[in-house]
Each structure stands twice: as C-alpha cells, then as structure tokens.
Image (tube, rainbow, N blue to C red):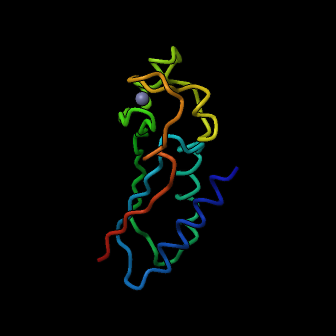
Amino acid sequence: MHEWALAESVIKTLKNQKKRVSKAEVIFGKLQDIDREIFSFAIEELLKQEKDFRPVIKICEEEAVFECISCGMEFDLKKGLEDAGEKENVHFLPEMVKVFIKCPGCGSRDFEIKKGRGLSIRIKEK
Ligand SMILES: [Zn+2]
C-alpha cells in the first residue's frame, strides 16, 4: 500500500511550497507500480482532513520512452513489447522491463529508460 505513503508525501510537498498551491498535476511514469485509483482515493481522503488547503490535483500518466544503447533508436513501451511478442497489459516493475522488451531496431535488450519511471509534480501557484 505505498500509494498512501506517496499521496501523503505529495500533499506534504504541496503544503511546503512558499506560495499557496491552487493546482497541481501529479505525473506517474507508466512503469511505476502504482494503483492510480487507490492513489487518487488517498489524495481525496487526505485533503478532507485539511482545513483550508484544497488544491485541485490532477493525476496524469507519462508514457515510457526507451533508448537503445546499441543503435540509438528511441521507442515506446508498445513498440518494444510488440517486437518481443509480449502483450501491452503486462504490469511491470522498472527492474523487470528488460525481461519483456527489446529494441525494435536491432533486437538488443541493452537500453536505457529515458522516461516513464518516476513520479513528478507540476505545481501551479496562485
Ligand atoms: Zn537497437
């Protein structure tokens, strides 16, 4: 249940901004092992406990992007999975990604994860 811990740290981060936060976007990388429903429920519940802190929090997803170290090709999750004959609905941990994906250009499993593994917060101040 690390969704609750993450939600708590997101709220904390927002509250610790110098200026009051009115809107924020929480962006999950597609490779993050997070249940978005649980996460947004946790955010809602935590905000209910706040007296005058009610930012609008939007949850978005960032596509994963990989770059092949052998041939330099950039590719997304769908393409990498297709080429390796896997289905897109495989639920991954970032550490597992090399088991399922290979470069559509040269077939190498030697690639970097450029995008899609982190969690970021985009803040809009009032
Ligand atoms: Zn390649």
Q: Which of 45 and 113 is in front in this view?
A: 113
Residue sitting at x 60%, y 42%: 33
Residue sitting at x 37%, y 37%: 72
Q: In which quarter of the image is residue 8?
A: bottom right
Residue sitting at x 43%, y 40%: 64
Q: Which of 38 and 84 is in front in this view?
A: 84
Outermost residue, bottom side? 18
Residue 101 vertical position relative to residue 29 in the rendered view, above or below: above
* Left/right of residue 58 with respect to residue 50 in the rendered view: left
Q: Nearer the viewer, residue 58 or 78?
A: 78
Residue 44 vertical position relative to residue 82 in the rendered view, above or below: below
Q: Where is residue 87 in the image (x, y as percent from the top left)?
A: 51, 18
Q: Which of 40 and 90 is in front in this view?
A: 90
Question: Which of the image's four quarters has the C terminus?
Answer: bottom left
Residue sitting at x 41%, y 39%: 67
Q: Position of residue 20 (x, y in %)?
A: 38, 80
Q: Position of residue 109 (x, y in %)?
A: 54, 29
Outermost residue, front side? 70
Outermost residue, right side? 1
Q: Position of residue 105 (x, y in %)?
A: 38, 24
